[in-house]
Image (cartoon, rainbow, N blue to C red):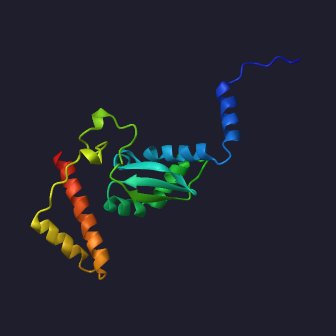
Amino acid sequence: MAERGPRDLRLDLASVIDRLDRRGRRAQAQAAAAWADAAGEHIASRTRATGVREGVLVVAVDSAAWATELTALASHLTEAVNELSPRAPIEGIRFVVSRETARPDAGPADAGKGQGTSASRVTPVPLTDAERAQVEHATQGVTDPELRAAMVRAMVADMEWKRGLRDS
């Protein structure tokens, strides 16, 4: 019988895990983990990959403005993620607005930088009359009164929360 040399246990373990992971979740997790490197430090500090759904990487962002900006860069960012995680290429990226965008690895050193701040610790700061008037003006083109009222409430709540975040 031929003597076998030393084997790399990591290769054997990776092979077993790949066979057990029929849905490709390990590879999808690698795609999500590649987000921070693909996006770069500046973007990654304001976003968090939450997972892959039906081949699309879902990324939480801290504002609608960021979602819009990043949507314009989505094809470039998709390519960057796929370069870093070729085993499970994603088809695209969907950006969702979330107040909880801190990366899981953000530690105490990141406090005060807009990361890792829990929404429950932020006290919203009321808008001035002039700011409320701007919100009203921004939504005056919406003809449906219920939709317009909902948009005003959402915009005011978001702006008040962000003012509280800045002041905390």
Q: Residue furthest front?
A: 146
| Residue 58 position (above or below residue 132) | above
Q: What is the quadrant of the C terminus in the image?
A: top left
Q: Residue at x 25, y 43 (%)?
A: 113
Of 98 and 45, the residue lying toward us: 98
Among the 4 quarters of the image, the one containing residue 138: bottom left
| Residue 132 position (above or below residue 119) | below
Q: What is the quadrant of the N terminus in the image?
A: top right
Image-based side of 24 in relation to 129, left or right: right
Q: Residue at x 16, y 68 (%)?
A: 132
Q: Residue 108, percent across and down?
A: 29, 33
Image-based side of 54 in relation to 107, left or right: right
Among the 4 quarters of the image, the one containing residue 30: top right
Q: Residue at x 44, y 53 (%)?
A: 59
Of 36 and 119, the residue lying toward us: 119
Q: Residue at x 24, y 44 (%)?
A: 121
Q: Residue 44, percent across and down?
A: 38, 47
